[in-house]
Image (cartoon, rainbow, N blue to C red):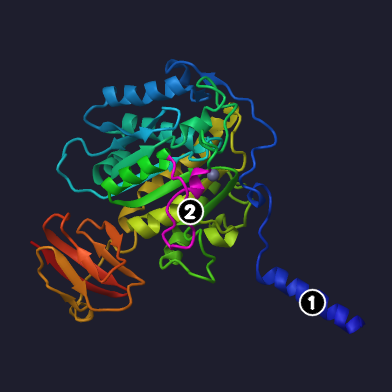
């Protein structure tokens, strides 16, 4: 009996060292609101945002976005993705090379606060827009970033949730939209395992917007924990590892390492790495991350940026100082997304049987295994393939790369 007891103790000790247990705090019930409501000061005018120690009212937010568009007309463009259930605007700022409008640059996308009370990212995105615009031409690093990547920033994708307490405060912010729907359980399930009832207009608008673009890299910003949550959310690693899991872990580590050089305590509340595969944390379906990755061939990560969903406004500047370098460096990862830097060898080309090539419209792939198949254009934008028949009708004429596993084939549309 005693031997058995000791053996059991050893087993428990071994399993504890073999795999680090996940710490359960906000992340155990991430949909719960913060128990302690933070003190928030609001900026009722754009001028009151000058010190960045407040949250904007809804009107101030819209005025800031419109003000930047007027102040930097050649550097940015203000898009309206759509409107919310209660008619508030869902806005996106495009910041891109002002001197060469015809440049074909890869597209990057930041989108925040689809959970209305997770407002750290909302504030960060406004400050990021301001930083990129005001630093253009003076900061070599940021000027080069804007010149080489088309940057799209949507600070607030659930305005009705954030301003549930009225347009003048974020103190009454809630997770859900005005129909009390969790927008991050309301995207089409790309794996066909979970039905979707009544898609909300915020998401319908977002889907239409991302469908007009070919975002190479993106991030969806949340709060309630501090962790980089990479795909998949619908599966645990043991069920279905993401083909670029190693790349995601490296990107996540760079992000976390950078913020920890400013505050060593950051990103430790889920695990010590601060990086986790989504389903290994907790499995969800109908989330945005898997939809973006699987349907749009985008590389999207979910960033959980602060354990407290609504930070006290007095903490905002500190958090920005700890995180801004990580957020900027993440944009700079865009050219390094897997599939972008492809070298096509003769040996590789022989492997993919595709015809006709060149083609006017349709391509037929003679293969039964499409589990890792992508079509990539010459600036590295990739789209996941789901069928042996590819319709290139809407694609510009030119050269594309067909990638299946480790094999690559050049195809031409004319
Ligand atoms: Zn969230």
- The image quarter in which residue 176 lies: top right
On-image quarter of the N terminus: bottom right
Label 1 residue SS? helix
Give percent across and percent down for residue 277.
Answer: 52, 61
Write down which quadrant ligand 1 falls in: top right
The stretch in magenta equals 182-200
Disc with the residue nearer the chain's start (1 vs 2): 1
Q: Is residue 2 left or right of residue 312?
A: right
**Magenta region's main secondary structure?**
loop
- Residue 385 position (above or below residue 33): below
The front one of 115 and 266 is: 115
**In x, y percent, where is residue 241?**
47, 69
Query: Disc 2 designates what residue?
Result: 286
Left or right? Give the position of 133 relative to 349. Answer: right
User: Dot 2 surroundings within 10 Å: few (below 14), some, or many (20 or more)?
Assistant: many
Looking at the image, can residue 203 be seen? yes
The residue sitting at 52% across, 64% down in the picture is 235
Distance in Å between CA atoms under marks 1 and 2: 41 Å
Q: How many marks?
A: 2
Is residue 141 in view?
no
Question: Which image quadrant for residue 368?
Answer: bottom left
Disc 1 designates what residue?
10
């Amino acid at each position: 009996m005693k031997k058995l007891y000791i053996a059991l103790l050893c087993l428990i000790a071994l399993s504890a060292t073999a795999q680090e247990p996940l710490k359960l705090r906000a992340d155990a019930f991430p949909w719960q609101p913060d128990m302690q409501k933070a003190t928030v000061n609001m900026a009722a005018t754009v001028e009151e945002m000058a010190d960045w120690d407040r949250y904007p009212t809804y009107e101030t937010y819209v005025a800031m976005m419109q003000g930047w568009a007027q102040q930097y007309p050649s550097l940015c463009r203000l898009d309206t993705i759509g409107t919310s259930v209660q008619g508030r605007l869902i806005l996106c700022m495009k910041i891109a090379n002002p001197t060469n409008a015809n440049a074909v640059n890869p597209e990057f996308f930041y989108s925040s606060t689809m959970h209305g009370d997770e407002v750290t990212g909302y504030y960060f995105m406004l400050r990021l827009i301001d930083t990129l615009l005001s630093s253009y031409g003076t900061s070599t690093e940021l000027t080069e970033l804007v010149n080489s990547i088309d940057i799209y920033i949507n600070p607030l994708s659930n305005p009705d949730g954030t301003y549930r307490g009225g347009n003048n405060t974020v103190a009454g912010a809630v997770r859900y939209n005005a129909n009390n729907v969790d927008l991050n359980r309301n995207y089409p399930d790309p794996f066909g395992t979970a039905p979707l009832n009544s898609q909300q207009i915020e998401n319908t608008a977002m889907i239409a917007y991302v469908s007009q673009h070919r975002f190479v890299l993106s991030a969806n910003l949340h709060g309630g924990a501090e962790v980089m949550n990479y795909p998949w959310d619908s599966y645990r690693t043991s069920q279905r590892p993401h083909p670029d899991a190693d790349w995601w872990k490296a990107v996540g580590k760079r992000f976390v390492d950078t913020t920890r050089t400013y505050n060593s305590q950051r990103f430790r509340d889920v695990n010590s790495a601060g990086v986790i595969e989504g389903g290994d944390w907790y499995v969800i379906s109908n989330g945005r991350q898997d939809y973006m990755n699987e349907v749009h061939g985008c590389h999207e990560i979910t960033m959980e940026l602060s354990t407290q969903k609504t930070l006290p406004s007095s903490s905002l500047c500190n958090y920005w100082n700890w995180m801004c370098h990580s957020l900027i460096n993440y944009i700079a990862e865009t050219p390094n997304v897997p599939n972008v830097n492809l070298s096509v060898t003769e040996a590789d080309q022989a492997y993919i049987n595709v015809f006709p090539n060149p083609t006017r419209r349709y391509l037929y792939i003679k293969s039964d295994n499409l589990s890792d198949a992508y079509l990539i254009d010459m600036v590295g934008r990739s789209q996941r393939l789901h069928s042996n028949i590819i319709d290139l009708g809407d694609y510009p004429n030119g050269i594309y790369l067909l990638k299946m596993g480790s094999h690559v084939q050049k195809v031409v549309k004319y």
